[in-house]
Amino acid sequence: MKRDSNKGFSLIELIITIAIMAILVAIIAPNLTKYLGKSKTKTDLKNADEIAAQLHNCITDYEAEYDRGLLDSYPGSITVSWDPSLLYHTTPVNADFDKIINQIVTVETESKEVPDDYAKATITSKGDELGAGYTIKVEVGNTVVTK
């Protein structure tokens, strides 16, 4: 009579397999968290860059539609802050510019790296002469983009 010798894995074999898997996880886990952190930072950078580009479009549309510089009425700078309870908030309030922002800016403004932190943009005139342009500084979490 033929005897069946298939008894399965021994306890030692299982312990060795689990130990090898634990070592692999210990090696891979720190690298994975590092890459996830970099991914969140890059997402914030992409979103901040997109917000700056869209704000540039808003300024161009505002000046084309109203035939005047954005900061003619509000010298210095304008701050645009996004908040979950409001779509956005502009200080000082410029209803015409607000309307254009509402139509154009549609990117995600919540930081991936710093949860519950929302984008803030500051638009500053580069000078008094005509066509000097603007500096747009966007902050999303710990990421700052200036254009």
Image (cartoon, helix red, strand yellow):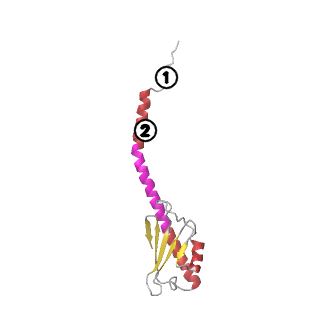
- Expressed as whole percent of the image width and height from the top left, the position of residue 121 reads 48, 72
Q: Position of residue 92 (x, y in %)?
A: 52, 79
Q: Determine the secondary structure under disc 2.
A: helix
Q: Position of residue 46 (x, y in %)?
A: 48, 64
Question: Quick check: 88 above or below 16?
Answer: below
For the residue marked with disc 2, what is the amino acid?
Met
Find residue 124 and name its label.
none
Residue 99 occupies quadrant: bottom right
Mark 2 — residue?
21
Q: Is residue 135 above or below residue 25?
A: below
- For the magenta stretch, what is the residue range? 26-48
Residue at 46% x, 27% y is: 9
Q: Quadrant of residue 41?
A: bottom left
Single out the residue that lies furthest toward the front: 85
Q: Is residue 124 magenta?
A: no
Question: Is the residue under label 2 in contact with that under label 1 (CB below 8 Å)?
Answer: no
The residue at 41%/39% (across/down) is 22
x then y, percent, for residue 20: 40, 37
Quarter of the image with the C terminus in it: bottom left
Is residue 23 shown above or below 70?
A: above
**Magenta segment, prevailing SS (helix, strand or loop):** helix
Residue pictured at 41% horizontal, 41% vertical: 24
* Closer-to-camera residue (140/117): 117
Q: Secondary structure at mark 1?
A: loop
Task: Identify residue for label 1.
Answer: 7
Pick whichever of labels 1 and 2 is earlier in the sequence. Answer: 1
Tell me the CA gap for discs 1 and 2: 23 Å
Residue type beneath disc 1: Lys
CA neighbours of label 2 inside 10 A, class few (<14), some (14 to 19), many (20+): few
| Residue at x-position 43% and y-position 54% | 35
Q: Is residue 45 magenta?
A: yes
